[in-house]
Image: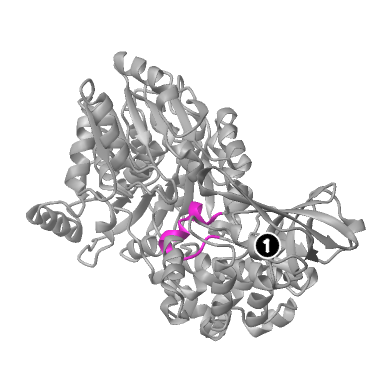
Amino acid sequence: MELNELKLTARRFGLLQKMGITTLEQLLKTYPFRYESHQMLPFDQWEKGDMVGFAGLIASRPSVIRLAGNRTMTRFTVISWNQEIQVTVFNRPWLNAFPFGQTIFIRGTYQGAGKVTALQAGRKPPEEGLIPVYSMIKGMKPQDMPAIMDKALEHLDQLPDLIPPALRQRYRLLDKNTSYRWIHHPPDEKRLHLAIRTLKYEEFLCFQCAVQSESALGVRKQPRVFDQKLAEAFLTQFPYELTADQQQAIQDVWSDQRRDTAMYRLVQGDVGCGKTVVAMAAIKTCELSGGQSAMMAPTEILARQHLKTLTNAGIPARLLVSSLPKKEKQAVLEGLKTGAITVVVGTHSLFQDPVEFASLGLVVADEQQRFGVAQRRQLLEKGKGADFLMMSATPIPRTYAHFLYGDISLSAVRTMPAGRRPVDTRYVRGNSMKPVLSQVLEGLREGRQCYVVAPAIDENLELDIKGVTSLYEGMVQVLGKDWEIGLLHGRMTAAQKEDVMTRFKEGTIRILVSTTVIEVGIDVADATMMVIYDAHRFGLSTIHQLRGRCARGPVQGRCWLLSNTRDTSAIERLQKLEELKDGFAISEYDLQLRGPGDLLGTRQSGLPAFVLGDFEKDPAIMEAAVQDAAAELATRSWPPLMEYVRQARDSVRYMD
């Protein structure tokens, strides 16, 4: 159902668009972030700091005090509970029109000593019971979301009922309509908890059905047969000694390739830990066994870097990306179809229908969370029983991996190469580069380069978000006469991005202003400084990957996290990065805060991230969902759930 069918005002419809809410389901799943308990408690039960509600007779004419910035403060006294109570209301100057002796209803915070700071004041009695409180963006009024939600709740029949009736009965879950009504308008705490329990289970069940439907586990294949000595000889060419973790991961992969069921393995580890060597070892053995390999990267820049790495290691690979000239692209397609090309590196171009393989034996997905599960499936379907190796610099704790991926095999590369030092990270309060500018300039004069990262392409004044375009323009004005400054973001063409990155790698560009497009895979040894604007808007794992770009050379990397947020929990998270250096520890901490949706890539596959589900608090519900999803996929007895899975599989968003 389209939101315009709710007949909202243009202003409210625009607010939802700014929040990224485009469907009825997204709107109804915008749950309150807390609830306030509104009860008419007697005055003698009030304690300082309590939220109180009461009716009173106005006992003094309201006086309006003008404050700076067109703000006002209105004060008056009321008689309630046989007490004289002083009431202060901000930015409600019209209250001075209330006559002496009139009844007024107040809801606000008790300050002690008979004083209340009112949040609501008017002729209507305040609601009693549990009142939902929704997150608000700039321009939104407190009454907007409740009013919008009331309209949405009138159309619950438009939402599919995703939980099979037998499972609702087994776990004594609420029906769909009641669960949504009670979470937005809870009659009491007990029924609120029942609604949350039901909707948590729905989240976990849908997530598991989608994940398990995409699993490559158990697919039969022909075992890979290769010469072990030739495979080991390939590893001796590298000018460094492999770490014990790398060696173990390689042995894990080779063992998988020799089995008669398709490999389904995730190799995870920090940026720069050497996961690419593991992938190259798998590609080499697939080549030795007569199979073809496809390595997919989320961006063309990273695909070209992988191509160079493979070629330098003696693996004859070819590139397949959308920007290739037509004649060259056709030659690659023909080579893959005939088997003349054994290794191809590419982006989403590898998924396209014209791509055919003679004998695809291995798919390697680098930064796999950047691809939707549907994209991974499309490539796997081009080879019968192809092995599937995923790599991620966003480590997922082993205790969670079973739920996120099913029975996937895991290899962890925790040990960093010798001499690699963690990036020195500092939280800087404010949204100006001025406090760190002298250190950045000193580094530039020493021959180092700097990344400047922002969360958006364009500046958003309403949400107070820095954009790379305005940052770039400002830096060119201030520093452009002394240093070459480059701009990089997702709306640029592949050729433009490639040109900027080439000049940055060559050292012509000294400061690169970019979005998170540089998060994965770009290796520039002299780029040892990074400034991240609006750092509180990024997940910790994303920041950890970003700062990993500063650790690709021999010089100590430095990263400054700029943020003007006043949210104490957000500040605490950023300060945590000053002490946490290990990606596995950061991922576990980040996962507890954000949920697994972004780590798995569910946003690209059409699945929502968890809103209510909590890994720490809901292990029993999670485990039940794993078992129930397997049973439902086996029987496919509940059409609405299967249709949800189908839509999740077919919903694809490309990153390049």
| Crowding at mark 1 (Cα within 10 Å: few <14, some 14-19, many 20+) | some
Disc 1 element: strand
Residues drawn in magenta = 596-609
Q: Nearer the viewer, residue 452 or 315?
A: 452
**Image spot of residue 569 (x, y percent):** 62, 42
Q: Residue at x 49, y 62 (%)?
A: 217
* Residue 262 vertical position relative to residue 450 in the rendered view, above or below: below
Q: Nearer the viewer, residue 466 or 180?
A: 466
Q: Residue at x 50, y 79 (%)?
A: 642
**Image spot of residue 464 (x, y percent):** 44, 46
**Image spot of residue 152 (x, y percent):** 54, 78
Left/right placement of residue 306 relative to residue 354 reads right
On the image, which quarter does residue 431 sit in? top left
**Image spot of residue 560 (x, y percent):** 46, 28
* Residue 167 magenta: no
* Residue 255 vertical position relative to residue 562 in the rendered view, above or below: below
Colour scheme of the picture: one colour
